[in-house]
Image (cartoon, helix red, strand yellow):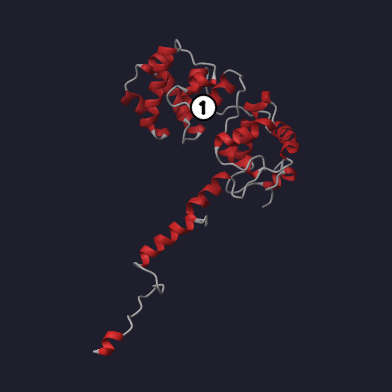
Amino acid sequence: MAGRRGRAERPIAGAVPGARGAPAERRAERRVTAKRIGAPDRTAAARRRRTGGFPARRTRDAPVRAPAILTRLRAAYPEARCALEHRNPFELLCATILSAQCTDARVNIVTPSLFERFPTPAALARAKPEDLEDVIRSTGFFRSKTKSLIGMARALVEEHRGQVPRTMVALRVLPGVGRKTANVILGNAYGINEGITVDTHVTRLSRLLGLTRHDDPVKIELDLMPLFPQPHWALISHLLIFHGRRICIARRPRCGECVLADICPSAGV
């Protein structure tokens, strides 16, 4: 009996001496600990792909390189412009709201039917949610977008006499409109360069080019604004988007064809 009392417990396969809990629980605990100490995980990997794939930092010579970046991209993409098709500020505002988590190409397929049925803010303000949902369903998140579009249209009718406002403050209080959308409207519908539109392409290329170390759109915008002349703030966004779609592609960048390769700190990495 004494031997029975002193017998060592049989080790559990995969167990760590001194560790408590089942192996699955310990694996979960290790994952939590890894996140706390900054070890890479799947979320971090996804973030690296989204923001450029490499550790980003704003290089000291960013102000020196920025004019060349603007000049070369303007020469490479003289046709750079807003990809969302529109005929007036109201249509651009609707299209920009729809573009959230959706491609511009898909939005351009949907908007002709949308504007045929609801051509004005007043018409959209009177829309039944279920009717609008049917039109914009393919853009994704159609219920929340329906709520934003109808709320935005009602605000235009009730507070702005059916007109899209021309100021950042007035635009940002409209349902579904944040700083990015307001920058799109001001820069492209009214030619007012109050800020720089920062989307996923602008985020990724700005980090790869060493123009910012941030991945927050507002912080990136604040880094970019001093680097480029204010009259070109709307244009630099379009140029970076064009370049990101055609040459600096996220998963397969074509550095050998890039006009910025010799001044890009990430070229060939």
Question: What residue do we see at 55% from left, 49% from top?
Answer: 48
Question: Which quadrant of the view contains residue 77?
Answer: top right
Residue 106 in percent (x, y) is at 47, 33
Question: If the image is split into quadrants, where does the N terminus sit?
Answer: bottom left
Q: Residue at position x 54%, y 45% from top?
A: 50
Residue 34 spot, x, y in % from top left: 48, 58
Q: Position of residue 25 (x, y in %)?
A: 36, 63
For residue 133, above or below residue 64: above
Q: Secondary structure at mark 1?
A: helix
Which residue carries the number 1 mark?
Answer: 181
Other residues around mark 1 within 10 Å, as few (<14) / some (14–19) / many (≥20): many
Residue 38: image location, x then y, percent: 52, 55
Q: Nearer the viewer, residue 173 or 249?
A: 173
Q: Determine the image quadrant of residue 63.
A: top right
Can the viewer see residue 119? no
| Residue 152 as seen in the image, left or right of residue 128 | right
Q: Residue furthest top?
A: 161
Could you tell me which residue is drawn at 58 percent across and 27 percent down?
82
What count of labels does the image hold?
Answer: 1
Q: Amino acid under label 1?
A: Thr
Q: Up-down: is 91 above or below 45?
A: above
In the image, residue 150 above or below residue 263 = above
Q: Residue sitting at 31 percent across and 26 percent down?
A: 130
Residue 177 visible in this rendered orientation of the protein: yes
- Residue lying at the far front in this picture: please name it: 2
- Along the horizontal axis of the image, is 97 left or right of 216? left
Residue nearest the observer in this picture, 211 or 149: 211
Comparing 209 with 128, the one in front is 209
